[in-house]
Image: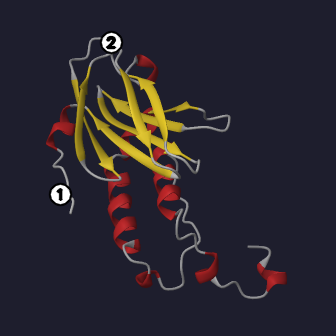
Amino acid sequence: MLQACWMGQLNFDKVFDFCGYKYALLSCIAAGGPITQTITPRKPELIPGYKEFYSEWISFAKNIFNLSKYTIPFGDQTGCGLDGFAKILNNNGYIFMFNPFNVDLTFNFTISDRLGFENDCKPLPSAIIYPYKKQTATYNFGAVVHQVIPAYGCVILQIGDSASEIQEEQTV
């Protein structure tokens, strides 16, 4: 905020990232590091769902903090492309997938030891938990997963025994 000295007082309502704050928070959780607060609106209560989103996902981050030391980045981390993070322990955990582009893209990855899965694992149920809740396929070790990631979006896949407990959201 060095620019504030020569720009005058900053109007946080104009600088606030109305589109990217969800992506930013979820990528902090995925990377396993501390959560860095983005520029917040002066009156967050005026942003529909803002406080609820932060409250839900900060609570989620606290609940899975023990998985942080098992975070494995994969995808196009060093280049321009889709990024992924696996947080897997004992064949249970989460796969975070991010798309920084303005078009929907398919993310492909393999259920393997590269992401922290054990070779002798039983079939693993999975469910999407963000941006909506939905049961998905059951995967075996070595299976290739194909997941469409929306433009400028994130998809979080829960995988393992607890994924079978996810209740699908009813859409209107």
Above or below: residue 16 compared with residue 67: below
- At x 40%, y 29%, the residue is 146
Q: CA distance from mark 1 to mark 2?
A: 35 Å
Image-quadrant location for residue 149: top left
Q: Nearer the viewer, mark 1 or mark 2?
A: 1
- At x 16%, y 37%, the residue is 164
Q: Where's residue 19, x and y in %?
A: 52, 65
- Considering the image in quadrants, where does the C terminus appear? bottom left
**Would residue 73 appear left or right of 2 to someone viewing this image?**
left
Q: In the image shown, does 111 or 169 lie closer to the viewer?
A: 169
Crowd tier of the residue under label 1, counting other residues whose Cα lies within 10 Å: few below 14, some 14–19, many 20 or above: few
Q: Earlier in the sequence, mark 1 or mark 2?
A: 2
**Would residue 136 appear left or right of 107 to someone viewing this image?**
left
Q: In the image shown, does 16 or 54 lie closer to the viewer?
A: 16
Q: Where's residue 150, x and y in %?
A: 46, 48
- Considering the image in quadrants, where does the N terminus appear? bottom right
Above or below: residue 110 compared with residue 106: above
Residue furthest to the top in view is: 120
- At x 38%, y 46%, the residue is 65
**Would residue 123 appear left or right of 142 to someone viewing this image?**
left
Label 1 secondary element: loop
Q: In the image shown, does 105 or 24 lie closer to the viewer?
A: 105
Above or below: residue 39 compared with residue 83: below
- At x 54%, y 47%, the residue is 103
Circle 1: residue type:
Gln
For residue 103, which numbered disc appears in the image? none
Circle 2: residue type:
Asn
For residue 119, which numbered disc appears in the image? 2
Label 2 secondary element: loop
For disc 1, the marked residue is 170
**Would residue 59 appear left or right of 97 to someone viewing this image?**
left
Crowd tier of the residue under label 2, counting other residues whose Cα lies within 10 Å: few below 14, some 14–19, many 20 or above: few
